[in-house]
Image (cartoon, rainbow, N blue to C red):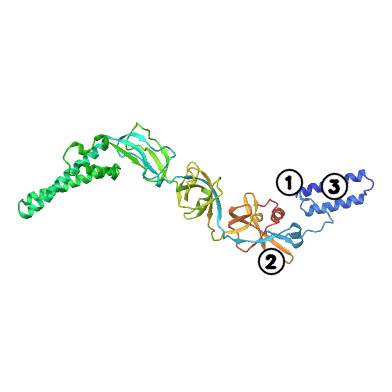
Amino acid sequence: MFWKFTLAAAVLAGLGGALYLSTSVSKAQVKHALKSLSNSAWASGVGHSSPETPDPATPPTDAPEAGPRSHWDGLVEVDAKKQAAIGLHLAAVQAQTQPLKLELSGRTAYDPNTLTKVRPRFDTLVVKVHASLGQPVQKGDPLVELYSTELAQAKSDFQTKYVQWQHDKKLYDLHKNLVQTGAISQRVWVDTQNDEQKSRLEYNLALDKLQVYDVPKEEIDPLIERVKDKAPEAIHFGEISEKAKMTLRARSDGIVIEREVVPGNYYEVSNVLMVIAPLDHLFVWINVYELDQDKVAVGQTMEIQFPFLAQKIQGKVQYVANEVSKDTRAVKVRATISNPAGRLKSDMLLKAILDIPPLPGQTVIPRISMVAISGEEFVFVHKKDASSEGHDKFERRKIHVAQETTDSVVVADGLEPNEEIVTNGSLILAQLYEDAANVETGLPSS
């Protein structure tokens, strides 16, 4: 009301000056203008006394007597003429049927479950390296050539165990026939059975050791052939230099993403020589911040977009981390996407549009209908009243927003489907509500 008081003072000053500076304005005219403005100021509350004047001012003697003030019901009343003047329009509140679109950022990564880490199974010297960093390899391709006396000893031990087992096996077959005729005692026959079983177990143990060393079957079979039904000469067992050699081969298709091996160096079983990753699929890691973490669940669909690709890839949430990252303050969410052409790489930045299914009770309204006041959101709901013909009333109602876009707002609670709300003209109703609240309480509305 301060602006009304200021305007009244300015008009009074102008008319007073005109009385002395112009002969065309009569005293009667000035008196009539002062009387009218004084009555208007009193009706608007401007005539109330200031804090410095404890006694209230006396209204003009000819001002109409003010009746008792009725209590304001908190509704803004607007007749049809004013509605047309401000261009007021209504829209019905819709129930949410479409999913929320949550836009997130993330990156690609290799699937750690499919990474092949190439390690030696024994302490060894690396003679030659066939694969370089970034090189595609196929299953069975040579990777690294090794030379190890430990491997040579294991192969020789395998041959020894095989020869011993074959000896005990032949003795077993011979004693089996003799025990049936009574030529040997039962004790000798029991010892023969025991020796054959022991040597067979030792042979299998030596074979298992070679398999643990990742020696291929193509290199094991020749070791047996050399000692099978041969005279016990050293040449039949093979040369030590040949037994010490072995070639590590790729166990799957992929690309070499790490290579730490250098020819001529000595490596232990704990060393990783290289890492091979398949590129037929990739992991996608998405950052979901704490504010939105309760909206994400396993099984939800997402649309993944790359800056340089026109293609949009579909994925599903497979994993939601149970902790918040200390660095990013976000929850990690994982999906898997296919990469048949190998065009996508690891650590590529991406944008993911996550679909959040609609929840019961949530509604959708036009963005223009929402008014933000002091950090809170409101809408004006049309209150139908048959008794007030030609005058519509509107309730200012607080809402809680689930998501806001440029065109619409998803409301978590505060509205019911099919209620009518103001779209165009909502800002003017907000000002009318403020003015009415000021007149009612003398304080700004909250």
In the image shown, does 251 or 405 lie closer to the viewer?
251
Please give the label number shown on residue 51.
1
Residue at image point 73% right, 58% down: 87
Q: Amino acid at mark 2?
A: Asp
User: Residue 144: horizontal and vertical position, in percent?
Assistant: 35, 37
Residue at image point 85% right, 47% down: 12
Horizontally, is 48 left or right of 112 in the view? right
Q: Earlier in the sequence, mark 2 or mark 3?
A: 3
**Which type of secondary structure does the marked residue at label 3 adopt?**
helix
**Which type of secondary structure does the marked residue at label 1 adopt?**
loop
Q: Residue furthest bottom?
A: 386
Callout 2–callout 3 Cβ contact below 8 Å: no
Residue at the disc numbered 2: 385
> Which mark's residue is nearer the viewer, 2 or 1?
2
In the image shown, does 65 or 332 lie closer to the viewer?
332
In the image shown, does 231 or 170 lie closer to the viewer?
231
Q: Earlier in the sequence, mark 1 or mark 3?
A: 3
> Which mark's residue is nearer the viewer, 1 or 3?
3
Q: Amino acid at mark 3?
A: Leu
